[in-house]
Image (cartoon, helix red, strand yellow):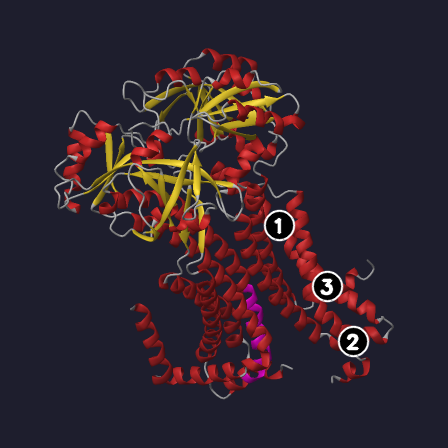
Amino acid sequence: MIVCVVLLLLLLWLFATRTGRQTWSVTQVGILSIPQRLGSSLVVVIGIAGVVGVLVAVLAMGAGFAATLRQTGSEDTAIVMRAGARTELNSVLDHESATLIAQLPQVQRNAGGLPIASPELVVVAALPKKSTGLDANVELRGVGERAWELRPALRITAGRRFQPGLRELIAGKGAHSQFAGVEIGSTIQLNGQSWSVVGVFESGDAYDSEIWGDADIVGPTYRRGSSTTSVTVRLTDAAAFDAFKAALAGDPRLKVDATTTRDYYTEQSARLASFINILGITIGSIMAIGAVFGALNTMYAAIAVRMREIATLRAIGFRGIPVVASVLLETMLLGLLGGVIGAGLAWLIFDHYTASTLGSNFSQVVFDFQVTPALIWTGLKWALAIGFVGGLFPALRAARLPVTAGLREL
Amino acid sequence: MKYLHLILSALFRRKTRTIFTLLSVLAAFLLFGLLDSVRSAFASAGHDIAGVDRLVTVSKISFTLSLPKSLLERIGSTPGVAAVSYANWFGGIYQDPKNFFANEAVAANFLDLYPEWQLSAAEREAFRNTRTGAVVGERLAEKYHWKLGDKIPLQATIFPQKGGSNTWTLDLVGIFHESDPKQRDQEDVLFFNWDYFDEARAFGTGNVGWYVSRVTDRTQAGRVAAAIDALSLNSDHETKTQTEQAFQASFVSQFGDIGMIVGSIMGAVFFTLILLTGNTMAQAVRERIPELAVLKTIGFSNRAVLLLVLTESVLLIVLGGAVGLVLAGIAVSALTAQLGGSLPLLPVGVAIWLRGLAFMVMIGLAVGSLPARRGMRLRIVDALAGR
């Protein structure tokens, strides 16, 4: 909104006022003479493109990671873990507690009258990664039979669901692409037992990094018996969360904490996402400083070449403001061009680029970079700012130089 | 060397332009120093000399799964094992989840396996004799202003106590110091007594997170590791034994391909830098064509002119780059002091300087080559006539 207003005011000024029209004609001369100093103008464009490209790419990494985890959660599902546990891996719930939690009245029931709750057991398996050949951790989630109703977004893209009671696994899209040996039909050895992979699923969030099996079968394999790590439930509606939490706290048999899954997954991403943002802005700032000096060099040179022309303009009555504004406009246009190229390259190369890192459950989280319009806009703002600073000092110099000195140049 | 004055005066012929270019180069190499420090910290994790004679035994399924304590004696009696100890990840939180540091419950002889951690005999004794005793690294103690005798409350995330309490209060009885200054991140850890942990925890008693063993002969490490894994073969708790190095390296590699990320960023930065300084050098040579022609007239050979211009551009990059790396060194020390262990950073040492200098010379040559050839090839008559 504000941008449109500013742009409109700028255009209005350029074409409706006398100084504006003067500025426009001086800017035209500047822009038309760019081909004569193509090399140095390109330096501004490419320098700023580099800054914006790196900035947008790094921020897209953080945005992608945060978005993947944020999408995993929702306001109307809640995850219950043992009091004090911050991640599922750290939590243990016995079978009895899991049953009690599912029976609470705030839990939505399905058409058959059964609570939509899934007691889940999150454990970690070490599997070789395709890219390095080294073992990396993948989250193995044993789920209850109503896990599918709990997560309607999840769909099987190849093969089929695992059969309850059998040693069968399905792999999320990300786990399937990052780890070796999780093809449909292959078998995975876990504690001397063979598990077969029977399907691949996609849900567009953090579950894509996981491998799923039946909780009742995963438990004994990991010597966890019938205990689980968490219970995830669908609430009757988002407003029921407070009552649900209170009911849990009020039951002396339970020592648990509930969080909405939205909050749970947002917290999981907070630390890494903010670290990546700080990193991106630090790198971007240092590069921007370099680019500002490059732009300063170019614009000082550009003005030196046009010094006589500018002095002539001022001798025939052009004031300082059109001269300053035209130099600024020129560098900011070059900057904008660089910003568009940099953000465009970042978008072409990195949008949906798949990466993985260690998440808070000590296992790999696969995520896609997301070059969002908001990030591109951030990049363009940086480009304009660099252009502005890089043009300001040369512009002031051009406007300040005594006319007589300028005319004697060369 | 005798032409240094000539090169310098050519370099600072237009002061503003040279200074701006220097500042751009400086920014690029400041970034290089910082990023290379992070990259080398990740790359060197687990590749240091210490730890080659120590083996880590974890569950084969994943290191998060515990192992039975009955393995202790069997590992200890494996030929080639000099000493064995064990530990368990505790994962406690001090005051705020943001204050992350490793905390582990360790057996009484655990610290004996790590001779590089210096702990006075008295403090070692106190750790053995204090049930709720804890030992921390010097850097961690400095960060939280702990001193001997302090009580440190940890909030359990995994292990509540038998009574249901989540708070474990520990008594600080020792502060150890890592002898290798490069490995000071090893000091960001808290150890407390296994016996207290095992008796008081609500579940899991009798299970061990991982075993650490020292081998008598490090060349035999592979054979000993295989022998240890053979102990539990086909049981329901199969193990995976690696050198401590390999264990750490595999853990670090899971953070992602740091080398690739740093490489791409530096690629973009250096590409921009080459264009930027290349343009400056081209301008500088273009302006000086009559001067170069005069040099040739008074007898400078083509080669001498080429070398003069090349040296000038290498000097430009090296000057800016060196200042950038010095600043990076200062920034890294400041960041390490500020952030403690939360961002792995290696001091800007000889290796980073050598890599940086190599890049400076290469970029300098790349940037200077075109203008230098132009200077070498120019014909005196044309140049003096301004054609």
Disc with the residue nearer the chain's start (1 vs 2): 1
Labelled pair 1, 2 in contact (Cβ < 8 Å): no
Quarter of the image for the N terminus of chain A: give it: bottom left
Dot 3 falls on which chain?
B
* Mark 3 residue crowding within 10 angstroms, few (<14) / some (14–19) / many (20+): many
Residue at the bottom extreme? A316
Q: Nearer the viewer, mark 3 or mark 2?
A: 2
**B178 or A343: nearer the viewer:** A343
A354 shown above or below B201: below
Residue B335 at what x, y percent from top left?
51, 42
SS for callout 3: helix
Picture layout, residue A67 above or below residue B125: below
Q: Check the residue under mark 2 and report the chain it is in.
A: B
Disc 1 residue type (three-letter)? Leu
In the picture, measured across the screen, residue B140 lies left or right of residue A274, that is right
Q: Amino acid at mark 2?
A: Arg
Label 1 vs label 2, nearer the camera: 2
Q: Give left or right: position of A100 versus B229.
A: left
Q: CA distance from mark 1 to mark 2?
A: 35 Å
Spatial CA distance of label 3 from label 1 is 20 Å
Q: Is residue A247 left or right of residue B199?
A: left
Q: Which mark is residue B325?
A: 1
Question: Bounds of the magenta span?
Answer: A293-309
Q: Main secondary structure of the magenta part?
A: helix
Q: Which residue position is annotated with label 2?
A: B377
In the image, residue A354 sits, relative to residue B157, either above or below, namely below
Q: What residue did someone put label 3 on?
A: B312
- The structure residue drawn at horizontal position 49% and vertical position 73%, both measured from the top left corner, is A334
Q: Mark 3 or mark 1, which has the lower sequence index?
A: 3
Q: Position of residue A137 (x, y in %)?
A: 44, 39
